[in-house]
Amino acid sequence: MKKEINVFDYAGDILSKLRGGVLLTTKTAKGVNSMTIGWGMIGIEWNRPIFTAFVREGRYTKEQLDISDEFTISVPYGKVDKRILGVCGTKSGRDCDKITELGLSLEQPRVTSVPGIAELPLTLECRVIYKQRQDPAAIGPEITKASYPQDVDSSFHGSNRDYHIAYYGEIVSAYIIE
């Protein structure tokens, strides 16, 4: 069962949970993949509710987003197994099926083709309406040094050589899985 919500009534909760990690889930013919993210924004652009997710160029999730242009954001709400965020933040969907490994419950989406994750019940279904690669020349040296020091390539957890793509996802459905 899904309880429909106004995303802006939960914006504070979503943003506070984002710092500790939320799941960004994609779906293509290759399957469903979830990745832990800690960078994102909620807002309004073009008179639409938007969740902007930042995904590094070398990530498997980026490949899937470029194919499907849809994603869900699953937010911890209530008691959550921290192992979920750990595995989804350290393993690549290129190498394993994290959904099966963790025994996650996929929730039928309302509007998009991408399921929510029942174990992280606050769910935003999003359609990409704009994407943009970060311009390294426009990022100040202090941020570059902290976030892009270039010492771990994109094939490893903790990579920092590649920059991010900002995916602006129109929030087309928001609910809590009960």
Image: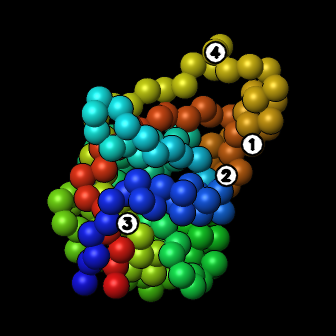
Disc 4 residue crowd, few under 14, some 14–19, many 20+, Cα 10 Å: few
Which element is circle 2 on? loop
Whether residue 67 is visible to the viewer of this picture, yes or no, is no
* First along the sequence among labels 4 and 1: 4
Mark closer to the chain start, 2 or 3? 3
The Cα atoms of the two marked residues, 4 and 2, are separated by 25 Å
- Residue 134 is situated, as x and y percent measured from the top left of the image, at 55, 25
C-alpha separation, residue under disc 2 versus residue under disc 1: 7 Å
Q: Quadrant of the N terminus?
A: bottom left
Q: Quadrant of residue 122?
A: bottom left
Separation of residues labelled 4 and 1 (CA atoms): 21 Å
Q: Which mark is drawn over residue 138?
A: 4
**Circles 2, 1 touching at the beta carbon (< 8 Å):** yes
Q: Closer to the N terminus: mark 4 or mark 2?
A: 4
* Residue 168 in view: yes
Residue 51: percent from left, percent from top: 41, 46
Of 43 and 57, nearer the camera is 43
Q: Look at label 1 and name its amino acid.
A: Val
